[in-house]
Amino acid sequence: MSDRRRATKRRPASPDHTSYLLLASFVTGSSVLVLEMLGTRVIGPYYGASVYVWSSLIGVTLAALALGYWAGGYAADRWPQLTAFGVEVTAAGLFVVMIPSLHKAVLSATTPLGLKAGALVSATVLFGPPLFLLSMTGPVAIRLVTSEFTMLGWNVGRIYGVSTLGSTLGAIVTGFFLVPVFAPRAILVGVALTLVIVGAIAMLLERRVASAVAVAVVGVGLAVLLAGSPEPPSNLVYMTNSFYGELKVLDAQERRVLFINGLDNGYVNRRTFESLTPYTTYVAYLAAARPAASRALCIGLGVGSIPRSLHIRYRMDTDVVEIDPQVAGIARRYFGLPDDIPVFVDDGRTFVEHARGRYGFVVLDAFSSDVHPVHLFTREFFASVDGVLEPGGVLAMNIAAFPYGEHSRAWLSVYRTLAERFRFVRVFKGQDVRPEETDRWANLFLVASHDPLPDPADLGAPGKDDADILATMAARELLPEHAGGEDRSVVLTDDYNPMDDLQRELFVAWRRHVIENTQSVLLFDGTR
């Protein structure tokens, strides 16, 4: 019989070994998706949950799988042993357990590379090795359960079928159950322990008891050593993870700040809870322009400064819709949002499309991590908002944008889309940015209505200090013709909405600024 003929037959795997390999393939498949999804929770708070971070993680995962399959095939031909499979799984677990301790150093070291390259290199260093090792296990498992080539297709299908099923359940369980409840660190340690145990079982099945015990002791020891969480810094008031990102409340001198995925989403005086964000005071314009209005809807909560001001300062019945229930709890507990302001946990668009009753004002102030939720900036959504406004009602919104220069196309597109629906639209800068400062961004406060919107300078002040606010707004009005650059604005629709692309340079610059100025805040994950 030729060598090739002999190579086609192997001793059939025992039922115990086959059952183990199928179960282990399920575990490794689920671990791959858990790691890929957790990558945004490890890298995202620093580099942002942007398309660059997601692209980096997906690209690294696919590259690791490709290289791992190739290397696994090579290993399967030369070391077709269950011990080899166990070593690969165990090594992956040991790499995973190191991620929580290494990520701060890696993120700091990659900062000079910039947001794009930094995100890619960080994803490669932190997640590349374990993903590579996990993908190596597939070809080895197939070789171990295949005794002859006539059964090759069946065994390939079984291994990759259970692995893919594991990936499917891993994605669902991570997104729906693990991330909203546990910190990324705890999930990573849990994945690492699971992989180490799976690897140790392989060695036990090969009757390598000493190796199995050593692997288990090392793995558990590292997990215990690295899982501890020392007391946080004194200025960290609260920290948690929600389905939508990492949430931190910090006190800095007289300020209290809410960080969502590393970006500040509002700050207040921590004793009075009065907003220290300039654009939030612009709601004075709404009260002055429409003094008869008595009901408002706020889409997006953050620290709750706008609904709090409308409700307390201007005596309006105010509803809030916020997609993240954790943010709602934080706003009440740490930022003074009154209990009698109802908060509806829902997507803003869904709420508006099913809203009962009408509002004098609808205020849109929503961010999805680093970016604006694009489905709230379309012709179709503005039509839905128009349907819940009272006659003469006002839609107001806050967006982050470059007021001047070539990147002003983003806010000009929002303006154009509003102007298509509403006859009157005005725009006010939240910060004093001059036309020559084309690289500076600002909060822009846009107001739109079917009825005339008066000049702030012509309005009477409805409350204390409002005269100064209205005077500031009058001086900071931004006209489309003053934006500079070529006006290549577009109407934003559900079918065509390039809002993310139009604002990409803004959010890259914004994230770079945040990293440069608050790096220690971004890196803090509850441990020292």
Image (cartoon, helix red, strand yellow):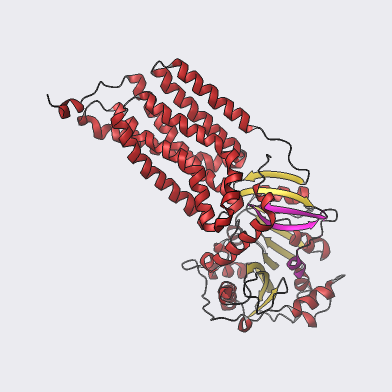
Give the percent coordinates (x, y) of residue 221. 58, 25
- Quadrant in which residue 87 is drawn: top left
Vertical position of residue 503 compared to residue 246: above or below? below
Tell me if residue 396 comes above or below residue 256 in the rendering: below
| Residue under the point 56% across and 66% down | 505
Residue 64 within the magenta-colored segment of the rendering: no
Counting from the top left corner in percent of width and height, residue 36 is at: 49, 44
Identify the residue at horizontal 51%, vertical 56% (top origin).
117
Which residue corresponds to the image point at 68% horizontal and 49% vertical from the top-left? 520
Answer above or below: position of 170 versus 111: above
Whether residue 358 appears in this view of the structure is no
Return the residue nearer the eye: 431 or 318: 431
State the image coordinates of residue 126 (x, y, percent, origin top left). Answer: 52, 43
Residue 62 can be seen in this image: yes
Q: Which is more toward the observer, 230 or 413? A: 230
Q: Position of residue 408 (x, y in %)?
A: 59, 75
Assign the C terminus to one quadrant of the image. Answer: top right
Question: Which corner quadrant holds the N terminus?
Answer: top left
- Of 50 and 114, nearer the camera is 114
Question: What are the residue bounds of the magenta stretch?
Answer: 253-282
Q: Quadrant of residue 17?
A: top left
Left or right: residue 75 versus residue 46 is: left
Number of numbered discs on residues? 0
Is residue 449 or residue 53 the one in the foreground?
A: 53
Position of 152 with respect to 93 (left or right) is left
Q: Residue furthest left?
A: 1
At a point 54% along the width and 56% down the height, the residue shown is 113
